[in-house]
Image (spheres, rainbow, N blue to C red):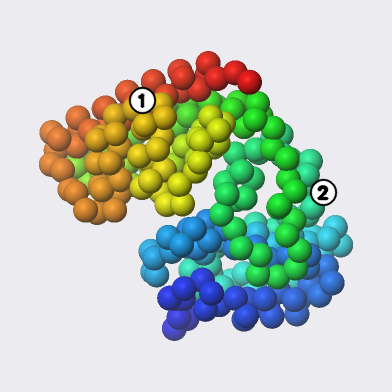
Amino acid sequence: MAKIPERPEDIFDEFRVDYTTIFGDDLLAIILYGSGARGEYIPKKSDINFLIALTDNGIERLGDAMNLVAKWQKRRILVPLFLTKDYIESSLDAFPLEFFNIRSAYKVIHGEDILKDLIIKKEDLRVQCERELKAKLLLLRSSFLQAQGKVHLLRELITQSLPAFISIFKALLHLKGEEIPGNSEAVIQAIAESFGLDRKLFQTLWYIKRGEEKPGRDEVKEIVWKYISEIKGLSKQVDKIVF
């Protein structure tokens, strides 16, 4: 059985060798991002995320990596994000939030640092943050109704939705010129302070996501409804941010 890494660093050498063997000079960079780069990796729970930058010729040979991707998926390594430098540079206005979050915590384990000089425009980032908040607000409402008051579904709604909001929260702190904390719990506290959100509520959401609190039916219904209300208010604030 394929062994799940205890630390992302445990697989760096093997991972690097595998991809350099296939792509050679067409491999520009291998970059770790996400929880593994933030120091929040939990074995057997967290995924390990890599961005792999290839030349135009390398991206045309992407099929050569099919078996390799399958090999690493058995060890809980997600399919890497395969990109070219041109794709990244031409997509910063379309996906500013995604690239902002990748760049917020990453480690180059092979090749050049293709992220350090990226310029993400604040207005592009603000627009996507607003769009993502409003889209996720609609999803929260529909999921709340679909759960039909079932405790496990409401808890699951919190567990699955909160990480996506945390990625938006980091960008919002950046837009306000504030320091972005190094861990997710601190990000939640900072966003509540910065935007006047219910700090106790978001702390509870974090504890539920971590499995440290398991509220009953009536309590979790109230928590989710307050959650929806807070995101609604936050989206209105983001709509009014100007530069």
Question: Callout 1: few (<14), some (14-19), or many (20+) C-alpha neighbours within 10 Å?
Answer: few
Left-right relation of 67 to 61: left
Q: Residue flagged by tag 2: what amino acid is it?
A: Asp
Measure how far apart labels 2 and 1 are at the Cα level. Answer: 40 Å
Q: Which residue is depicted at the point 46% across and 19% down?
A: 237
Q: Is residue 42 left or right of residue 128?
A: left
* 135 versus 25 height, above or below: above
**What residue sits right under mark 1 in the picture?**
196
Instruction: Give the image location of residue 179, x and y in percent.
Output: 50, 41
Q: Specify the quadrant that holds the C terminus.
A: top right
Specify the farthest residue to the bottom. 1
Amino acid type at circle 1 is Gly
Q: Is residue 129 visible?
A: no
Please tell me how crowded label 2 is: few (under 14), some (14-19), or many (20+) other residues with Cα within 10 Å.
few
Secondary structure at badge 1 equals loop
| Residue 22 percent location from the top left of the image | 76, 76
Quadrant (top left/top right/bottom left/bottom right) for the N terminus: bottom left
